[in-house]
Amino acid sequence: MAFTLVHYGVEHQQTLQQDINHKESKTLQDINHKHSKTLKNKTLQQDINHKHRLTTKACEYNKIKHTQQTIKYVGPKSE
């Protein structure tokens, strides 16, 4: 009888350990998943910021270029 109880206790303990391991692995998976989503979001945000900076620089460049052209052709030169 004592053997059966010990055996049952061991099985029960193994089941509990498996449950704990399963929960730990699910938690780690969730953490990894959230971390990878965060990294993806960061990368996307960096891409957006980079493109925005490039666009802003291009706009500024075009403004300067336009201004220079306007200055170049102020009017006819008088001789």
Image (cartoon, grey):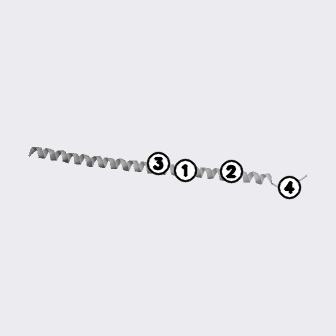
Q: Earlier in the sequence, mark 2 or mark 4?
A: 2
Q: In screen coordinates, is 75 left or right of 61?
A: right
Q: Which mark is residue 76?
A: 4
- Marks 1,2: beta carbons within 8 A: no
| Dot 3 crowding, Cα within 10 Å, few <14, some 14–19, many 20+ | few
Q: Which mark is residue 47?
A: 1
Q: Toward the viewer: 23 or 49?
A: 23
Given the current orientation, which residue lies at the most extreme right position?
Answer: 79
Q: Which mark is residue 30?
A: none
Q: Earlier in the sequence, mark 1 or mark 2?
A: 1
Query: Where is residue 79 shown, x and y percent of the image?
Result: 91, 52
Q: Earlier in the sequence, mark 3 or mark 4?
A: 3
Count of numbered tags? 4
Mark 2 vs mark 3: give the one in front: 3
Q: Which mark is residue 61?
A: 2
Q: Toward the viewer: 50 or 69?
A: 50
Whole-angstrom CA distance, mark 1 to mark 4, is: 47 Å
Whole-angstrom CA distance, mark 1 to mark 3, is: 12 Å
Residue at image position (58%, 51%) is 51
| Dot 1 crowding, Cα within 10 Å, few <14, some 14–19, many 20+ | few
Q: Earlier in the sequence, mark 1 or mark 3?
A: 3
Whole-angstrom CA distance, mark 1 to mark 2, is: 21 Å
Q: Mark 3 — residue?
A: 39
Residue at image position (48%, 50%) is 40
